[in-house]
Amino acid sequence: MAKAPTTKTKSTSGPRRPRQPAAGTLPTREQLLEALKNTDDIKGKRDLAKVFGIRGDMRRPFKAMLAELEGDGIITRTRKALRRTAALPAVTVLDIPTDADPDHLHAFPAQWNEEEGERPRVTVLAGPNVRVVPAPGDRILARIDAGDDDIPVYTAKAMKILDKPRRGQIGIVRMDDEGARLIPVDRKQKEMRIPLGDLLTAADGDLVEVEVKLSGRLMIPRAKVVAVIGNPMSEGAVSMIAIHNLEIPYRFPASVIREADQATEATLKGREDWRDVPLITIDPFDAKDHDDAVYAEADKDPANPGGHVVIVAIADVAAYVRPGTPLDREAYTRGNSVYFPDRVVPMLPERISNELCSLKEGVPRAALAVRMVFGADGKKRNHSFHRILMRSAAKLSYQQAQAAIDGNADDQTGPLLEPILRPLYAAYDAMASARDKRGPLDLDLPERKIVLDEKGMVKDIRIPERLDAHRLIEEMMIAANVAAAETLEQKKSNLLYRVHDEPSSEKLQALRDFLGSLDISIKKSDSVRASDFNGILGQARKAGNVEQVSEMVLRSQAQAEYSAENYGHFGLNLDRYAHFTSPIRRYSDLIVHRALIRALDLGDDGLSENETLKLAGIAQHLSSTERRAMSAERETADRLLAQFLATKIGARFEGRISGVTRSGLFVRLLETGADGFIPASTLGQDYYRYVEERQAMIGDRTGEKFALGDRVTVRLLEAAPVAGALRFELLSEGVRVNPSSSRKGQKRPPRSYGPKGRRKR
């Protein structure tokens, strides 16, 4: 049975002093809890430290112990006061995290008042006598046992696996005779009733965000409106659809905000003083955080004539986000920041990402820096890592830096041109030469940027110009990432690699078949390098069909991911690679920072033993959150573009065929990048057969061919903004080929004609 919450009673003979540890040693967890239970005058952390005589070097591990107790949900903090957390009831509903170890399940209460502190962690029992066997991601009704000791050690036996409604979701309010109901945007979710007292200001037809509450012993879900988003077609609503559909956490718990707000600026203690090194940040003009800074100079070593010294400094997030704290657990859950046209869902609260870990101009900031020495040929000769205190000399945009180098310096960049910018570009020129010899995959596909107006609606779609300033920062970040992986391998430290496998034999064969139809050859061996693909792209540019070939080369590639095992990065043509340069927005980079701190003995806040043992699971989780973020960003772009084009029904557009399936053609519009579909049954008055090796639809009778990469004219017939879908009518004629080429080895289906003589598929 769970224990009832402990209540303090004031003794008439004065407060009882807790058992004291031996002089110069830390108290045990049991002694700390006994003090909170029996000593009335303890109000906060300082009082507790006085009781146990904590001073000097004992302060940091003492704080860590308190953070661990708070993280485990055993004690809680209200403002600055510490107290024991309320106990769990004997039977309650638990949620098992999706990333829990299947062999050692743990769970947290499904409903918990954050004022009571962190949710307590519960071990879910398994074994031959357990009748209900849950899995990661399940919600369960469970019987709770708190153990017999002063410190509750919660275990649970699952009684029943429950349906798990999302904690928050969005939908349209519809009023009816019985009151109000929520029509979820996601069709997979069920409708719910909304008590009239829980509508806030929502009216019929409004898009709202709701909190799902379970009522009664049957745990019936009811919706409570927590925010009225308003117009379902507004941009803010569009990004919220993706956030909720993919269950992206976007509100920070109170304990996380509190921890971030209480963080103080790092000092020079334990760091090298690099405040006089004129590092600068180069970012997009509208960037709110600046987590990387660069500096370069000619190498003064006579043994390295024409060489360069390059420094890359990265915000020291590890100094503020310690393993096992609420801030750390929330960052891990999110995995990465997610970027939408109207908002960012950050991995860390603004107090950390936009303040303490933003390398602001003229402000001392903690950083982890790598000093790299390159030869005149651009090859790295050596490197070293340093934990520093720096002060950015300038905050520049990519456009500013490039304009200065191109002869159009402004008042800010003029004084920086000779001492800072020219040495940076000189170092980059050498590094770029080495990169070209290395031969990474050169798929420079344009990325469109959606521009919003003041009302949050789509104003324009642009392809930002790709500048040498972008390439400079990219190349220096890649070099720093390689240096991090090399150092950790040299120190025989476990680490999180960024890996990209070579294409599978099946995908290579499909690419060969396609290239063969274009008279472009690729070697028959399954052992290919990125440079082989660059050769293919070079042939395609000469033949004038680079768009077709680029699309197929991209499809042949494996997806990059995180891994505790190294199998190299095929696309970059690197043997070892780790993400080090963006710990503000990627948890993987924070792991690498901690690994470096531990391996190089740069502090006591390095990678914990527990994290080291779980790197494989961490890698899997972070790969999953990255894919989730990419899906959310892509879904939102699709919905925005469908909304933007919804007023242009009937208009003609130029596009390229971006996909070919048996069902029809996918077309990407040249101007906006919007994707739409043309059903095969609407292509024409012929039977169009899908020919996989050509990535084409070819007419049986006419030989008319529509292939991947072909330029076509289409008419917009339908736009569905909420679904992010467009349907086109094809207006162009295809290229004529020998019709028999589409029928080799295939049976012809029976003739079936639709309206107006069209044959149906």
Image: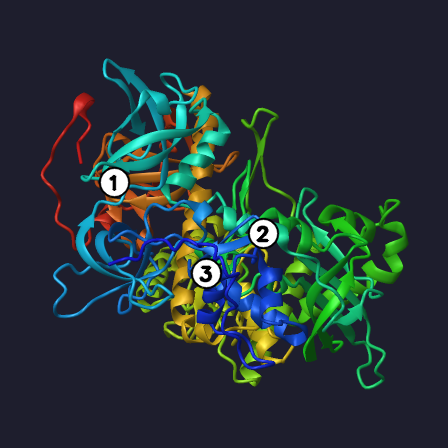
Quarter of the N terminus within the rendering: bottom left
Query: For the residue marked with disc 1, what is the amino acid?
Result: Ser
Tag nearer the camera, 2 or 1: 2
Indicate the colouring scheme.
rainbow
Q: In the displayed orientation, state which residue is furthest to the top.
A: 177
Mark 3: which amino acid? Lys
The label nearer to you, 1 versus 3, is 3
Of labels 2 and 1, earlier in sequence is 2
Q: Could you tell me which secondary element the residue under label 1 belongs to?
A: loop
Tag 2 residue: 80
- Is 508 rendered above or below residue 230? below
Q: Earlier in the sequence, mark 1 or mark 3?
A: 3
Between 131 and 718, which is closer to the camera in this rendering? 131
Q: Position of residue 741 (x, y in %)?
A: 25, 50
Image location of residue 726, percent across then percent down: 37, 31
Q: Check residue 663 in the rendering and tell me which mark sits there, or answer none.
A: 1
Is 343 left or right of 724, judged from the image as shown? right
Quick one: 402 or 146, which is closer to the camera?
146
Instruction: Specify whether residue 727 is in view.
Output: no
Q: Residue at x 57, y 61 (%)?
A: 321
Q: Is residue 295 positioned above or below 143 on the image?
A: below
Amino acid identity at mark 2: Lys
Q: Which residue is mark 3?
A: 37
The residue closer to the viewer here, 310 or 267, is 267
Q: Are marks 3 and 2 in contact (CB under 8 Å)?
A: no
Instruction: Give the residue displayed 37% in from the left and 44% down from the top.
Output: 246
Q: Are marks 2 and 1 in contact (CB under 8 Å)?
A: no
Q: Is residue 175 visible?
A: yes
Task: Say which element carries label 3.
Answer: helix
